[in-house]
């Protein structure tokens, strides 16, 4: 008897199978066991979801922000009660450690509560009119139906920071989660369902990017599109949305540097490099990828870094002593190994890791030991292209000025970090670095939920997510001139 759980799409307030009945397994990257069976949807499923959202949106937008916020609070409470369940599912689906998965789920709870409170904030301003008898003011109105395309690396936090503001500002949502983490998505979706959101307010459609993701970008019934993922796919999504006049925002890749100045606290800088670059197996868009160290402290930093990396335990994320889990899927595992080969072929020195662990218990999983390269130059692939894995590239700089030049010498501009004790150097770095998230004496990864998040250059479409900045994407400004 097959007891593998089967999950459906969520459309019109009900759980339903894909129209064609097709399914795919969600596989545990730690051992290739099947976590669950999820839909392989078609555009017929997408059409049904968009239709349900459009039917629901007029009633949803008529609710007050406080009424919508009450439902978000309920969803947050339900999710909080299921932290362990959702966290364990996330670990089994994409590999990050259970502690990290629980922390991410708790962040999702906090985001829901934050945006629930946003329902009570102002939505416009009174503007002086030149006519003394007139009242002129602005208000904000929802886009209508928002499509959310989300990745597997943060299967709770990223969807929630898109869905929660979309809902609180009066939009209905069609959500396409990554198939690799669709079981986790179903458990998140269950919290919205049990919180009592009206049918059609939020839908979840599981399917491939070409079928569902591109279908959302092209669908005339979707009025805004928010995407997090790779640059190549993001540009396709943006082009399709632009072609039909839909609003869109794209959060894409990063090649994030940490710069270590000559006066840095090296212990703290090493800790930030490892946490920022190797936590979640390096599968964060804000992960540290390039480590640019001023020559005066390069050798000391290198020695401390290698000593620390050697202590990290690779293993199943459900084991309490595991520090580094597997790559999320076989495709990502193959990508990471290919970049490690490129680094060696280009002449960089692989001074630690970059291989499959020797532990026989890990032979079936998508594991790779954290890799550290030195002798890296800025034009090498491993210094230019996003790897999305546990790979650190060490670059030596003659001065802080050269280090900043190297930090900016990529097409991306998502996050960047500097370690220094000098306030003048810190201010110069903040001024000169091309990044949307700049951190001084803190790791590159991570942003507080109440703060705007987004990148420069090729890392985004230049909009911002999270915090109060989210209202800029999920609403349109309406200017009203009223005269008796």
Image: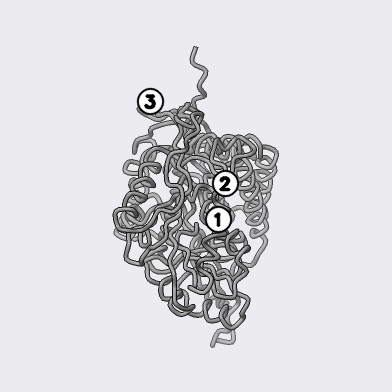
Residue 299 position within the rendered picture, expressed as x and y whole percent measured from the top left: 51, 66
Residue 333 position within the rendered picture, expressed as x and y whole percent measured from the top left: 40, 42
Kindly identify which residue carries mark 3. Answer: 21
SS at badge 2: loop
The mark found on residue 53 in the picture is: none
Q: Is residue 42 above or below residue 69?
A: above
Kindly identify which residue carries mark 1. Answer: 274
SS at badge 3: loop
Residue beneath the point at 37% across and 47% down: 216
Nearest to the observer: residue 474 or residue 469: 469
Nearest to the observer: residue 472 or residue 61: 472
Residue beneath the point at 49% across and 53% down: 284
Q: Is residue 148 visible?
A: no
Q: Is residue 404 above or below residue 2?
A: below
Give the quadrant of residue 193.
Answer: top right
Q: Nearer the viewer, mark 2 or mark 3?
A: 2
Which image quarter holds the C terminus?
Answer: bottom right
SS at badge 1: helix
Residue 26 position within the rendered picture, expressed as x and y whole percent measured from the top left: 45, 31
Kindly identify which residue carries mark 2. Answer: 312
Q: CA distance from mark 3 to mark 1?
A: 44 Å
Nearest to the observer: residue 306 or residue 97: 306
Q: Marks 2 and 1: CB-CB under 8 Å?
A: yes
Residue 267 position within the rendered picture, expressed as x and y whole percent measured from the top left: 62, 63
Which is more N-terminal, label 1 or label 2?
1
Residue beneath the point at 31% across and 58% down: 347
Q: CA distance from mark 2 to mark 1?
A: 10 Å
Q: Nearer the viewer, mark 2 or mark 1?
A: 2
């Amino acid at each position: 008897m097959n007891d593998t759980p089967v999950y459906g799409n969520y459309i019109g307030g009900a759980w339903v199978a894909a129209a064609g009945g097709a399914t795919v397994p969600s596989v545990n990257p730690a051992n290739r066991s099947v976590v669950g069976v999820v839909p392989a949807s078609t555009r017929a499923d997408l059409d049904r979801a968009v239709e349900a959202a459009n039917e629901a949106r007029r009633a949803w937008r008529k609710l007050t922000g406080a009424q919508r916020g009450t439902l978000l609070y309920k969803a947050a409470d339900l999710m909080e009660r299921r932290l362990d369940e959702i966290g364990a599912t996330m670990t089994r689906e994409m590999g990050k450690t259970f502690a990290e998965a629980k922390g991410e789920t708790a962040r999702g709870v906090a985001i829901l509560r934050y945006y629930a409170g946003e329902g009570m904030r102002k939505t416009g301003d009174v503007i002086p009119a030149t006519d003394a008898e007139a009242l002129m003011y602005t208000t904000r109105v929802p886009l209508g139906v928002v499509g959310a395309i989300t990745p597997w690396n943060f299967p709770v936090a990223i969807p929630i920071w898109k869905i929660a503001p979309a809902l609180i500002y009066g939009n209905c949502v069609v959500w396409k989660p990554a198939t690799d983490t669709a079981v986790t998505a179903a458990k998140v979706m269950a919290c919205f369902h049990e919180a009592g959101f009206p049918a059609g307010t939020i839908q979840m459609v599981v399917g491939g990017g070409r079928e569902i993701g591109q279908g959302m970008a092209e669908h005339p019934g979707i009025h805004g599109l928010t995407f997090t993922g790779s640059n190549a796919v993001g540009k396709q999504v943006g082009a399709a949305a632009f072609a039909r006049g839909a609003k869109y925002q794209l959060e894409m890749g990063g090649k994030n540097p940490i710069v270590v100045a000559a006066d840095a606290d090296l212990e703290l800088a090493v800790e930030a490099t490892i946490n920022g670059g190797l936590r979640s197996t390096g599968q964060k868009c804000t992960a540290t990828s390039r480590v640019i160290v001023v020559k005066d402290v390069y050798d000391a930093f290198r020695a401390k870094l290698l000593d620390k990396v050697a202590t990290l335990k690779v293993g199943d994320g459900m084991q309490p002593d595991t520090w580094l889990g597997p790559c999320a899927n076989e495709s990502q595992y193959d990508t990471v190994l290919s970049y490690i080969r490129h680094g060696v072929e280009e002449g960089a020195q692989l001074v630690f890791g970059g291989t499959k662990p020797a532990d026989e218990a890990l032979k079936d999983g998508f594991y790779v030991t954290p890799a550290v390269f030195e002798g890296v130059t800025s034009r090498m692939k491993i210094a230019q292209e996003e790897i999305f894995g546990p790979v650190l590239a060490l670059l030596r700089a003659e001065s802080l000025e050269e280090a900043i030049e190297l930090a900016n010498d990529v097409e991306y501009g998502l996050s960047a970090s500097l370690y220094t004790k000098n306030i003048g150097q810190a201010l110069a770095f903040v001024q000169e670095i091309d990044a949307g998230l700049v951190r001084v004496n803190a790791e590159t990864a991570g942003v507080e939920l109440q703060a705007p998040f987004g990148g420069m250059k090729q890392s985004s479409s230049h909009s911002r997510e999270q915090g109060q900045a989210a209202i800029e994407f999920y609403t349109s400004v309406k200017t009203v001139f009223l005269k008796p």
